[in-house]
Image: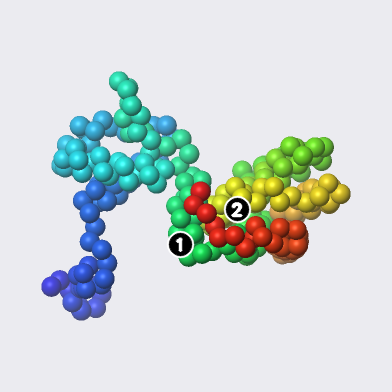
Amino acid sequence: MRQTESTGAPEQSAQQRNVRPEKLSESIARDIVREMRGLPPGSMLPPESSMANTYNVGRGSLREALRILEVHGLIVVRTGPRGGPMVAPRADSVNFARLASLHLHLTEATYRDIIEARLVLEPVMARLAAERQDRAVLEQLQAYVELPEPQNDKEYLHSVSEFHSLVAGMSTNPVLDLYSRSLKDIYTDRIESMVFPVSARSKVHADHTRIARVIVEGYTTEAERLMRAHMEEFLKFSADSHPGILDEVVDWR
């Protein structure tokens, strides 16, 4: 039995640690992902024959590895003369959310749990955005501030979704950004119709604009406070007007 470098203690086997041994296809999939890093969406990967030679495996194991990546939304396998594995056009939070929703469904997490988690995350995201002053983030928020107030349901829904999408991905921390955007993707599918009444929409737009401004101006504490108050108001409105939806178990997207 091998010994670990740090302690000299015997290293436990996968079976002793109660960890499932990794399949060959999973190992290949990991190697492919390493090679994919940095490639833009839509990039074609090498042909299957070339990849089989590179990883010294049979076509069956390679195709199983590609299927793993396809199921997780990381690649698309195109058919036809110019087909083959391609980096997915949307290797982003949507695919991560789909996988997460399956696990959340099994744990019987509800949409109320999702919103409560966002109530914790979004104020943090707003604070980090104000603190770190990422130029790309600030430009997007400044553009949002300059938008006119929505005049109809379609414009309002787009404005709300756009604002929270920006907030969910603007901490400049890729882990926080991915998790926060994924939570938004999960609840948006089910709760998109849960919008404030027309009489309250001017206030919602004003709140969004104010939060965006304090982030642009670098007021970290105020950005966090305003975002928390805004999310608390949304949770209260949702609980009062759509309690049945909030108590539904998250479904697999």
Q: Is residue 152 left or right of residue 163?
A: right
- The image position of residue 154, as x and y in percent, is 74, 37
| Lower sequence index among marks 2 and 1 | 1
User: In this rendering, does residue 42 appear at all?
Assistant: yes
Which of the two residues, 152 or 161, is positioned nearer the viewer here? 152
Q: Is residue 28 left or right of residue 139?
A: left
- The image position of residue 28, as x and y in percent, is 25, 47
Which of the two residues, 230 or 141, is positioned nearer the viewer here? 230
Point out which mark residue 191 bears: none
Q: Is residue 34 above or below residue 233?
A: above
Q: Residue placed at 22% from the left, 54% from the top?
A: 23
- The image position of residue 5, as x and y in percent, is 22, 72
Point out which mark residue 106 bears: 1
Q: Residue placed at 20% from the left, 79% from the top?
A: 9
Residue type for callout 2:
Tyr
Point out which mark residue 187 bears: 2
Find numbered disc 1 in the image and state the secondary structure of the residue it sits on: helix
| Quadrant (top left/top right/bottom left/bottom right) for the N terminus | bottom left
Which of the two residues, 15 or 42, is positioned nearer the viewer here? 15
Q: Is residue 93 left or right of residue 193?
A: left
